[in-house]
Image (cartoon, grey):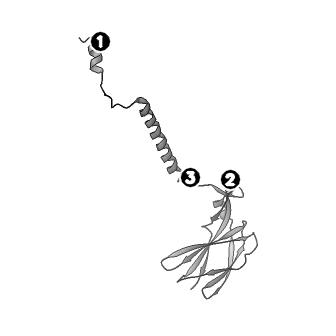
Amino acid sequence: MLNKKEVNKSFRVSLGEKGLSPVIATILLITLAFALVAIIFIWMTGFVTEQLEKQGKPVEQVCKEVAFETEQDIIGKTVYLQVVNRGNVNIYGIDIEFVEEKDSSMKSITFDVPIGESSAVQPIQVVGPVTKLILHPMILGSVKGKKVNKPVTCLDVEKTINLG
C-alpha cells in the first residue's frame, strides 16, 4: 500500500517553466469566443435585409398598386418617353433594361409622376443593337424605423417597348 507522500508524487505533473498561466489561457479563450461571435454576427447580417415600407405597408405589397402607361416617339436612335401614372402610388422614376439579342444593360431615370398625372418627355438614347426596352417603375420607400428614403424597383410591373 502507498503512503500519502508517494501518492502525491505519483499525481504531480511537472510542466517546468514553459506552462501557460491560467489567466492568459482565460483571456485567450474569451478573445476567441468574441472573435467567433463577431464572425457569426457579420455572416448573419447578410441574411437580414432592411425592411422598406410605403404608406405603412411593405413595398412589395405597394408595388402591386403601381399601374402606368407609356407614350413614346422613336426618332432615329432616341426614344422620347412620357409616363402616365394610372395607379394609386406616386412613381419616383423608371428602371430601363436595354435588351439586345444576347445581352442587356440597365439605366435608371428619376422623375416624379404623381397619381393621375404624366411626366415630362424623357429622351432616352439607344446605343447598339437594342431590340426592346423593358420599363420597371420605381417608388420611394422608407426604411422601417428610420427617416431614410430609398428607391425601390417594382420588378413585377413592367412595360415593353419593341424597337424593331
Give coordinates of residue 137: x percent, y percent: 65, 70
| Residue type for callout 2 | Lys
Q: Is residue 157 visible?
A: yes
Which residue is the site of mark 2? Answer: 146
SS under mark 2? loop
Give coordinates of residue 21: x percent, y percent: 40, 30
Which residue is the site of mark 3? Answer: 48
Of labels 2 and 3, the one closer to you: 2
Q: Which residue is more in the foreground, 128 or 67? A: 128
Residue 4: which disc? 1
| Residue type for callout 1 | Lys
SS under mark 1? helix
At horizontal 70% and vertical 68% (from top left) the residue drawn is: 91
Residue 8 as seen in the image, left or right of residue 125: left
Q: Which residue is more in the foreground, 57 or 5? A: 5
| Residue type for callout 3 | Val
Quadrant of residue 147 in the image?
A: bottom right
Give coordinates of residue 151: x percent, y percent: 65, 64
Which mark is first along the chain, 2 or 1? Answer: 1
